[in-house]
Image (spheres, rainbow, N blue to C red):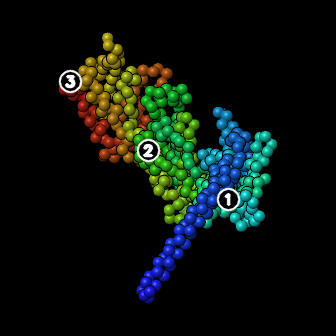
Amino acid sequence: MSKRIITFGIAILLIGGLVGAYLGLEARQEREAALAAEEAAREAEENPRFGVTQLIRQSEMALQRATFEHEDGRTFAFEYRLNEFDNPIWKYAGDHAVVLEQADVRSMMRDVFAFTVTDRLLEETERPEDFGIGRVVITGEFDDGTTEIIRLGGMTPDHSFFYAMLDGRNELFLVNLASGRRMTQDMTDLVDRFFPNVEGMQLRYLYIHERGRQPMEFDWYGHSEEEMFEMLESFGATFLVMRYPFPGRELNLTNLEMRALNSFAGFSAYDLVELFPTNLARYGLNDPSLEFILEDVHGGRIHLILGDMHDDDHYYMMFGDRQHVFLAHRSYVDDLFGLNPFNFIERFVTLVPIVDVDWISIESPGRGSHRIEINNFQDEDERDRIRPIIDGQAVQDQAFRQWYQILIAFTYDVEIGVQEENTLGTPYMTITYHLLERGEGPIVVDFFEYDPNFFAVRERPHSVQFVTSRLAVDTMFNMLPRLLAGELDR
């Protein structure tokens, strides 16, 4: 037998042995995998996966008090009181005057009365400290007399969960990230930083006082609550009157919104500096750099107090009804500084609707005296009409209305400060509007010589603080003879 044949035979035997060994190994692996699968299935059936489980099953109304003890010594508790609708309002147990962000607190309380875990990591935990257990201890006291204690730990290495334990059980659980973060919040994270809603066109009070400047104050002065709401129903807005520094002048709401209120959209305090300050002087809040109060007819109220600057971008601030010190970003409040009260008043001297007037007198030593009778009536279609008579002469309705628009269009053009009456002399002209409402006294406006371009104006009983254009007064007088001559008729 040749050597080549012997070598070939040996190779065939070796290959056959290897193939047999491989097939045997594969069969054995298949048997082991099948046994492992059967064992896993049997174990899963006998010991099902723990999964998401609610360990505390209570209701919000059943949770009387929740106490949070942090490992660094911070401890605070919350308890609720029912509002007028029998809904729970959560309060800081240390001081019920602290205003809390209710949505955030209620979410935090839900993590207590409905404590839910994502999974069970260990059935027995011999060394809880290895998982940071005790970082926060949360005690829930319920109305059935039971107490549940949740011990929160640190985060898992992948920062996806928090470790947690529940007193009375030895298991180590996993809590989802959102719940864990809520339960580890500090009480200061839950303090409300927002203003209440205020209807900018339905105001009843406004006050702005900047340090070193005169205050500006408007209110519903001289009118009853009934009148205020009648005006609100008719016009959708209220009309405030200035108390100071220009008494009797109406507030221009449009200018207020443009110059002061628009910056408040979305306002919130930036950061909490001190919850219960003992020395406001360190923040400049004992002598505020600015105080701002805004109230609407529905009870909404904003009371902002600003102190000194904390840095280039933030003021120290307080809400008027709270004792905490926050930071406010200057972008929200800068527009409240440097306001000129003159920009917030209605500029018309006497904008009297013609339908409210019975008759008018104009007295001027240099330009003559005139009596203007309006004679309001309604035609057969119940439309308001007038039969105007000037110095005994009837004039055309439309022509008279054109002149009347000039008469009531005098405006306050420049503020000149309060003028002493004994320096004003005799009025150049006095206009008196006698109103149809007999219970209301006449509106009397005096015009005094001031300089070649302006007359100083006083609406009695207020002081002289403004001037109006001499040109406007001359235009009114110059149109009067043209009106009487019929040149303005249409």
How far from the left and from the top, in percent, is residue 187? 66, 54
| For the residues bearing labels 1 and 2, Cβ distance under 8 angstroms | no
Query: At 48% from the left edge and 30% from the top edge, which residue is drawn?
Result: 232
Q: Quadrant of residue 324?
A: bottom right
Q: What mark, if any, has residue 487 been given in the picture?
A: none
| For the residues bearing labels 3 and 1, Cβ distance under 8 angstroms | no
Amino acid found under the numbered disc labelled 2: Glu
Identify the secondary structure beneath mark 2: helix
How far from the left and from the top, in percent, is residue 191? 63, 51
How far from the left and from the top, in percent, is residue 101? 61, 48
Separation of residues labelled 1 and 2 (CA atoms): 58 Å
> Which residue has dot 3 on it?
489
Q: Is residue 413 visible?
A: yes
Q: Is residue 88 above or below residue 231?
A: below
Q: What mark, if any, has residue 121 been given in the picture?
A: 1
Q: Is disc 2 surrounded by few (<14), some (14 to 19) or many (20+) residues within 10 Å?
A: some
Q: Which of disc 2 and disc 3 is earlier in sequence?
A: 2
Q: Is disc 3 surrounded by few (<14), some (14 to 19) or many (20+) residues within 10 Å?
A: some
User: Which one is in front, 304 or 96?
Assistant: 96
Query: At 41% from the left edge and 39% from the top edge, which residue is drawn?
Result: 346
Q: Is residue 30 above or below residue 450?
A: below
> Which residue has dot 2 on it?
257
Picture quarter with the N terminus: bottom left
User: Which one is in front, 113 or 93?
Assistant: 113
Query: At 34% from the left edge and 20% from the top edge, which residue is drawn?
Result: 374
Amino acid found under the numbered disc labelled 3: Asp
Question: Which mark lies nearer to you, 1 or 2?
Answer: 1
Number of numbered discs on residues: 3
